[in-house]
Amino acid sequence: MNRKHTSLFFLFLFLGHPILISAQEIVETKNEARSIMSDRYWNLWNPQIQAKIDSGINQYRKANATIVFKTIPVGTKVEIQQIGHSFLFGGNIFLFGDLKTLEKNKKYEDTFGTLFNAATIPFYWKTLEPEESKPRYEKDSPYEYRRPATDPVVEFCESKGINMNGHAIIYGMRRWGHPTWLPDNPKKMEGYFEEHVKELANRYGDRIQRWDVVNESIDQANRGVMPDDYAYKTFSWAMKYFPNSVKFNINDCDIHWGPSRRYVEIIRDLIDRGIRIDYSGVQMHIFNPKESKEIAEGKDILSPEKNYAVLDCLSNAERPIHISEVTVSAPDDTQIGKLIQAEIVKNLYRLWFSYPTVMGITWWNVVDGGAAPGEPSISGLFTTEMKEKPVYHVLDKLINQEWRTNIQVRVDKQKKINYRGFKGKYLVSWKDNKGKTHTKEFSLEKEGDSFEL
């Protein structure tokens, strides 16, 4: 240690271990980041599990590709740059335009397109249409916290090529999802439900790529008055009114709960009755800061085994899985607390990304203090001042560095190259003998894809 920097170091006692930490090195030094987690934690996330995760990432997220350079002279230097992921890395966009300053709002918006390629847009009916026949679609609609008017958000996402998920058409628990003006008669409610589905379909068509058609429908004991068999009916109306290209999701359960055969049975029953379900969503919320501390101490709360058990069970529904809502609260607002949050997230994201049937992961609250009432205020990727936390840098490194393929090659005598890369969109660029740059795009989606340029 350089003595002239001694004043920048602090001695912390955490999980029973003294840790010497500097403001700069605490983020950058891998060994220090690992040291904040207990030996019991690393016994769960051991080298064998890490090797299994690495193998899954290589097997399921990459593919072999062949590029044939028909018109490019032998010896030409070619750059192959990945510019997009097939896998969906998303966040909810509930604070769009709500961060008080232009600078903060711009940084928030820039997260979509740089870190995230997908966004979950709030369509909670209760706040979308708080007054009957006065929906909040347009820019100048009345303000609702965490519920921006939807048209501007859709337009923003379209402008940046962001994949969108509408959340949700019908929320299973009436307390949270439905306007207070809805009737209490289940039969009368059905007509309102169908009109609501039809209106969303007519307004947005295929502009929004995915919809959570029903959200949290299993807990029927606490749902309040609802139409009988409303999940089946809502999906039926969605199939009737939305274009065929729009994907339909069901969203429920939490990895904390362990495997849910009941959820699988509901999905399979709907499918057997002719319902089109494209993705099955499962959530993972660490709302209690104390729980994050216990995870760091090695308590078996969200172990690899529990994650695999839930995903293996849900795979029996035979639909791709969306890790649809992710909250990881830091234990506290200290630098060590932030690092614990980042370490938990890194291992969870790596495991989920390695699992064959997972198609996307959506972070829930992007900014500290931006959660719903009663949820943790220190679960963001940014501080309240929009400063990146360690968890932001962890995800940025994974998504934009470790999980991207960028190579440079020279055209050989066979005028082709074989390589293995992460699935997604690529940009190929080269210069001709006059120094002019040429570019071509292609998408690597499956094993053995071949392209001619």
Image (cartoon, grey):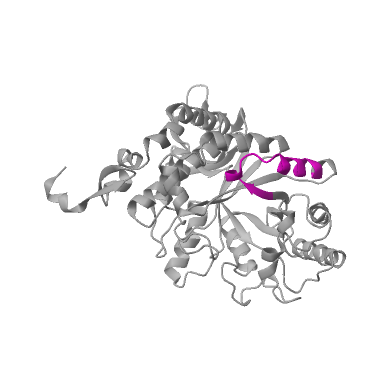
Query: Which residues, given as a range, are shown in magenta?
Result: 251-270
Residue plotted at (51% across, 42% down) = 301
Residue 272 placement, left or right of 399: right
Does residue 101 belong to the magenta stretch?
no
Q: Is residue 401 above or below residue 326?
A: above
| On-image quarter of the N terminus | top left
Does residue 258 belong to the magenta stretch?
yes
Furthest-top residue in this view:
413
Q: Quadrant of residue 313?
A: top right
Rendered location of residue 81, percent (x, y): 48, 40
Rendered location of residue 63, percent (x, y): 57, 30
Residue plotted at (52% across, 37% down) = 351
Rendered location of residue 253, percent (x, y): 65, 48
Q: Quadrant of residue 332?
A: bottom left
Furthest-right residue in this view:
187
Residue 278 placement, left or right of 392: right
| On-image quarter of the C terminus | top right
Whether residue 340 is visible to the viewer of this picture, yes or no, is yes
Nearer to the camera, 286 or 410: 286
Q: Is residue 352 above or below residue 389?
A: above
Nearer to the camera, 184 or 101: 184
Whether residue 445 is visible to the viewer of this picture, yes or no, is no
Rendered location of residue 289, percent (x, y): 45, 54
Q: Is residue 101 above or below residue 319?
A: below
Q: Main secondary structure of the magenta part?
A: helix
**Badge count:** 0
Residue plotted at (64% across, 34% down) = 312
Residue 2 placement, left or right of 17: left
Nearer to the camera, 184 or 122: 184
Q: Quadrant of residue 258?
A: top right
Q: Is residue 205 above or below residue 344?
A: below
